[in-house]
Image: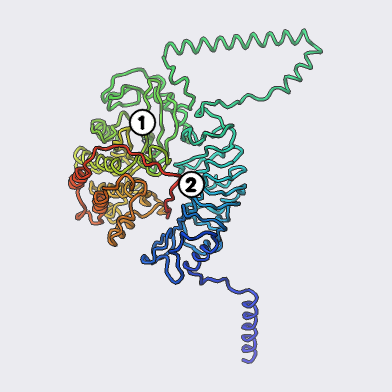
Amino acid sequence: MANIFHVMIKTCLICIVFLINYPMPSISVTHTEALLKLKQSFTNAESLDSWKPETDPCDKNSRWIGVICQNQIVRSVLLGRMNLSGNIDVDSLSQLSGLRTLSFRSNLFSGPIPEFNRMGALKGLYLSANQFSGEIPSNYFDKMQSLKKLWLSGNKFTGEIPSSILQLHHLIELHLENNQFSGPIPTLNQSTLLSLDLSNNNLKGEIPESLSRFNASSFKGNAEVCGEKLGKVCDQAPNNSNNNNTTNNKSHGNSNKSISIWVMIASIVLLLVMVVGIYFMCRRQQNRRAAIESFEEPSLGRRISSDSKKSFELSRRGSSIRKGSINGKRVGDLTMVNDDKGEFGLADLMKAAAEVLGNGPLGSSYKALMANGLTVVVKRIKEMNKIGKDGFDAEVRRLGRLRHKNILTLLAYHYRKEEKLFVYEYIPKGSLLFLLHGDRGIPHAELNWPVRLKIVQGIAQGLSYLHTELASDLPHGDLKSSNILINTDHEPILTGYGFYTLINNAHAAQALIAFKSPEAVQNHQVTPKSDVYCLGIVILEILTGKFPSQYLNTGKGGIDIVQWVKSAIAEGREAELYDPDIIASAKNSTSQMKELLHIGAACVESNPQQRINITEVIRRIEEIQQQTGQTIQIIPSLRDGCAEIPVS
Ligand SMILES: Nc1ncnc2c1ncn2[C@@H]1O[C@H](COP(=O)(O)OP(=O)(O)OP(=O)(O)O)[C@@H](O)[C@H]1O
């Protein structure tokens, strides 16, 4: 017993000595303390007067400027345009374990990039428009795997773009413009990337193929960057000067022989050039394909076959196809269901210059420019063997008969057991998703309040048309901002509809947004009411400018827009919700915006019985239009620099 007692005392003593030498790290730092310490590290923090000791940043009465909490946890610290300078106390920031979005944009910070990479859970980092300088270590982003939005534009960063950016698999926005980055453009191949700007740096070399979907403006202002997009052909000719010298030296010793060899080679080359030239002239005359010959993108056939692990026979099968009749008739292996845009066959499609538009949960989409000048989108849908060929044909032909200004009508389809393709007209301005959350250029600036109201109205009208025209009780099924295209008049055009009946059940539950409605989550029931729920999410997305977490299957990223709006309405905080980008254009329309917000909230009512119906939605929107009482005009409200979006 005495021995045991002795051992216990000894153990306690060892513990005490250990604790004295290695004190426990302070785990009791509150978010108030951490933020106040951060404030102390700034040299000019007058703008942070609302950050007061003995108040809680997450208490709604304290109103700490720039601090956003969720469930009493600090989620975002947004300190843009606050005239701040000095050191940024990263130690204090890293005490905020729930922090996901950090912004110091448009301040006066300088020196090397601080060690924000110690905060591995950050999803949004905005440092634009400061004076940060120097090289960013190549492995800087190694431990920032959650990062989705990275804005470093308008600083003085030098050196190569850190290679660890390639490892950011969730990256949505990357803005490095207006710095002094040098070296090659990294081969970023994240399919998540929606917005990219590398302009006005000292980058060089060819624009990687994986970034070909971005506009020239993303790369301009880099004197040594080349690529078709910039109208600057990359010089790929190998440097033969050394070889030539060697050849010349040899030719001195053996001049007669080498002259005749050169003459022979030159003649053969000339002959070859002539043969190739004649061949192309004949082909040009026969096919009148001047447009496509000047376009050097890979063909759709090659795109699709390279995307497929299996051997893909379409290109070969299509090549024998000649012109045929249309209007629901087959043109080769392609069935045209709508000839409004002219006729084409599978061969035309497969030879078209193509680029990948995206890989959504339903499959991949390609943009294809055909020889006749028509640009189409080909959607290749996975797991679509729910119904047999006859049922499939009947269903899809019906989609081809739909006609409404807010509906993108199917043009043609291809059916084989192992391959289904759907062809639509290409809408150049792109999707609402892209306009809202992508490039912050002019198309985004055009989205002022009247335009957004017009877009909501068109979406509701298109949806209502679908509900009457589709077979009884069939929903659109996949109403989300990437399936809402915007034409040049800001008229929304719905796409992505009609797949609900065609794709396999298990896949539908994973891939279609209507399955995110509360009734679908509870009992897998999807009806037109579920579309109204999705419409609600889109309305809230349009009004707030926030990316809804509901669009992501991972459950990570974006903001739970339904909960956020519901609680703000319950607390009478509607005014805090609106996208700052529309405020300027909506000075006298706050009550109309509020009404639209309430319509959105009524759409996301969890009980489908109590949910507003689409006719009522349209009626109430018309009332708002009348009150707004103005014709829709584009009033650009260009913003300066980036605006940070809390990414949760
Ligand atoms: N007809 C079209 N014209 C222009 N852009 C289009 C067209 N159809 C689709 N897109 C755009 O191409 C991209 C990829 O579309 P895709 O439909 O494959 O994916 P998604 O809408 O994200 O998901 P889902 O697979 O659920 O439809 C999206 O940004 C979409 O807005």
Pointer 1 local density, CA inside 10 Å: few below 14, some 14–19, many at least 20: some
What x and y, as percent, mark residue 69? 41, 61
Picture residue at 21% right of the left edge, 42% below the top: 629
Location of mark 1 (residue): 426
Mark count: 2
Vertical order, 482 against 71 (above or below): above
Picture residue at 44% right of the left edge, 21% below the top: 292
Residue farthest right in this picture: 253
- State the quadrant of the C terminus: bottom left
**Disc 2 secondary structure class:** loop
Asked which quadrant contains residue 161, the reply is top right
**Disc 1 secondary structure class:** loop
Ligand 1 closer than 8 Å to the CB at disc 1?
Answer: yes
- Pick whichever, 629 or 203, lies toward us: 629
- Pick whichever, 70 or 302, lies toward us: 70
Q: Which amino acid does label 2 sit on?
A: Leu
Circles 2 and 1: CB atoms closer than 8 Å: no
Residue farthest bottom in this picture: 2
What x and y, as percent, mark residue 254? 80, 11
Give whichever of discs 2 and 1 has the lower sequence position. Answer: 2
What x and y, as percent, mark residue 242? 73, 23
Pointer 2 local density, CA inside 10 Å: few below 14, some 14–19, many at least 20: many
Location of mark 2 (residue): 171
Picture residue at 36% right of the left edge, 55% below the top: 560
**Left or right of 593 in this view: 139:** right
Q: What residue type is labelled 1?
A: Tyr
Q: How far apart are marks 2 and 1 (CA)?
A: 26 Å
Vertical order, 189 against 515 (above or below): above
